Image (cartoon, helix red, strand yellow):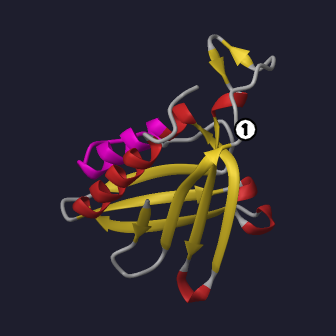
């Protein structure tokens, strides 16, 4: 999925690389029917901010369930719906949104392993509603390749 501000920058290219563990494993991480270890996904991100500042990361920062929730959240945000801030178990990515008639502003907070030197960064992506809807659909299609195990 690519989030790209209408001004050209910043740009976020976010992809799922695969499951953290290749096969479903039987560890003591099953909590209320959810096998945490089997469902961590490696997410790769390439970020290009203004003035040539760029970085990348590849970390197990979302579960299968969290990845699906992100897709739903993006779709709602693209539709102009009010969406609460979306955070996850790992503090690598957090999403918030403000919407106007013409544009949607998605704020992505990068933390922990998703940012250089572990210094939190927040970037604003001013996008059209249709541009965010396209990104949401791309993410949802990508997530469908990685079902809950």
Outermost residue toward the front? 23
Outermost residue toward the left? 101
Give the quadrant of the N terminus.
bottom left
Q: In the rendered structure, does residue 48 fall within the stretch colored magenta?
A: no
The structure residue drawn at horizontal position 45% and vertical position 36%, both measured from the top left corner, is 69
Residue 53's x, y, as percent? 63, 82
Magenta-tinted stretch: 68-84
Residue 118's x, y, as percent? 78, 61
Answer left or right for 98 relative to 129.
right
Give the quadrant of the C terminus.
top right
Outermost residue toward the bottom? 51
Dominant SS type (magenta): helix
The structure residue drawn at horizontal position 31% and vertical position 45%, both measured from the top left corner, is 75
The structure residue drawn at horizontal position 45% and vertical position 37%, both measured from the top left corner, is 68
Residue 65's x, y, as percent? 52, 31
The residue carrying pointer 1 sits among few (fewer than 14), some (14 to 19) or many (20 or more) residues within 10 Å by Cα, namely some
Q: In the rendered structure, does residue 82 fall within the stretch colored magenta?
A: yes
Residue 32's x, y, as percent? 64, 10
Q: Which residue bears the numbered disc 1?
A: 21
Q: Could you say which is closer to the camera, residue 110 or residue 64?
A: 64
């Amino acid at each position: 999925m690519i989030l790209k501000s209408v001004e050209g920058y910043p740009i976020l290219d976010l992809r799922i690389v695969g499951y953290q563990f290749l096969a479903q494993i039987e560890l003591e991480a099953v909590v209320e029917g959810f096998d945490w270890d089997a469902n961590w996904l490696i997410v790769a991100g390439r970020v290009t901010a203004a003035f040539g500042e760029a970085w990348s990361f590849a970390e197990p920062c979302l579960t299968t369930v969290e990845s699906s929730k992100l897709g739903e959240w993006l779709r709602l945000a693209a539709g102009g719906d009010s969406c609460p801030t979306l955070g996850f178990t790992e503090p690598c990515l957090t999403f918030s949104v403000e919407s106007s008639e013409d544009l949607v502003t998605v704020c992505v907070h990068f933390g922990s392993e998703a940012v250089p030197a572990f210094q939190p960064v927040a970037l604003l992506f001013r996008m059209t509603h249709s541009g965010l809807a396209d990104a949401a659909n791309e993410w949802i299609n990508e997530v469908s390749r990685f079902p809950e195990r």
